[in-house]
Image (cartoon, helix red, strand yellow):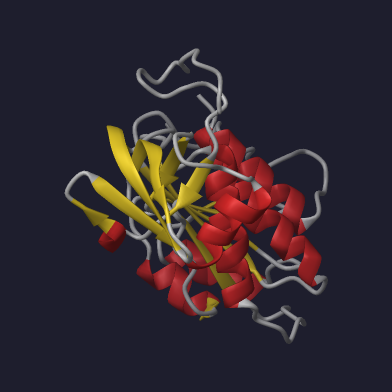
Amino acid sequence: MPSEETSPHGGVPAGLEFFYAAPGAVAGGTITVEGEEFEHLTQVMRHIEGDTIGIVDGAGMAYVTTVATLRKRSAQCSILSTHPRLHEPARQVTLALAVLKNPSRFDLVVEKATELGVCRIIPMVTARTIARHARVERWQAIALAAMKQCGRCVLPAIPPVMTFEEVIAGCQGGKVLFHEQASTLFGRSADTHGTLAWTVCIGPEGGFTGAEVASALAQQWSIVSVSDRRLRSETAAILAAALLLTP
C-alpha cells in the first residue's frame, strides 16, 4: 500500500500507483478493472483486497479507491475520493511532429510529451518526411502507460497521420512553427502567459522547406526557433512542450 502521507493534491496519497479504467467502467461508487489492467494490477503489482490504488479514466477523472473484491478476471474497486483533472495543466498544448526516420525517437517524444502534459500529439507527414511507418496503436499504448506512470488523468489524443497542410489549416489559438533558421527565439515573440491553447509544429530531420514555411506564414503561424543551437527534432519537440507546460 502507498504511504499514508498525502501529496500536494488533497486526499491523494503520496506514491499512489495508478491504473486505467474507461469512463464506462464506473458504476455508482464502484469501478471495474479488467483485461490487461487487471493482469497488471494482480500479477505484476501483486495488489490484494484492501489495497489503496489510483484509477484514471483518460477523460479527465482520477479516483482514489480500495480494491474491494478480486474475481477471476476483474477487480471491483470502491471509490474513496474523486479528483477531476488531477495533475493536468491549465494550458492545452497540441504537438504536431513529423514522423521520424528512427521510430524509437518518435516513441520517446510520445512518452515525454505525455508526462509533460501535452493533450494531443499529431503525427505528421511533410515534404521531407522519409519514414514509412505509422504506429498509431503503439503510440497510443505508450501514451497510456506514460499517463498512468505520471499520474495524469487525460490521455493525449493521437489521431491518424495528418499532412502538413491539414495541420496548419486546422489549428486555433497560439500557433508556432519551429524552424532552425528563424531569427526569433520562442518566448520572445509572443505573450505565452496570455494564451491557454497552443499548437507547436516540429519538422523532420531535414527540417521544413521554404514553401512550407511560407505556407505557415500565410496561415498566421509564428516562425520561431526553440534554441540558438540546432537540435534534433525529438529534442526540439520535448523542449517546446516543456517551455509551454512547465510553470
- Name the residue rendered at 44%, 16% in the picture: 8
Report the residue that reaches farthest toward the left: 28
Q: Is residue 183 visible?
A: no
- Name the residue rendered at 37%, 52% in the picture: 57
User: Which is nearer the eye, 199 or 153?
Assistant: 153
Report the residue that reaches farthest toward the bottom: 132
Q: Quadrant of the N terminus?
A: top right
Q: Is residue 121 left or right of residue 130?
A: left
On the image, which quarter does residue 246 sit in?
Answer: top right
Rendered location of residue 122, percent (x, y):
52, 67
Q: Is residue 152 left or right of residue 84?
A: right
Rendered location of residue 91, percent (x, y):
39, 38
Q: Is residue 148 visible?
A: yes
User: Which is nearer the eye, 36 or 197?
Assistant: 36
- Name the residue rendered at 50%, 24% in the picture: 247
User: Which is nearer the eye, 156 or 38?
Assistant: 38
Instruction: Please determine whether, in this image, residue 219 is positioned above or below residue 42.
Output: below
Instruction: Please determine whether, in this image, residue 65 is positioned above or below residue 139.
Output: above
- Name the residue rendered at 50%, 38% in the picture: 151
On the image, which quarter does residue 87 sit in?
Answer: top left
- Figure disc tally: 0
Rendered location of residue 147, percent (x, y):
53, 48
Instruction: Please determine whether, in this image, residue 229 is positioned above or below residue 237.
Output: above
On the image, which quarter does residue 10 sit in?
Answer: top left
Report the residue that reaches farthest toward the top: 5
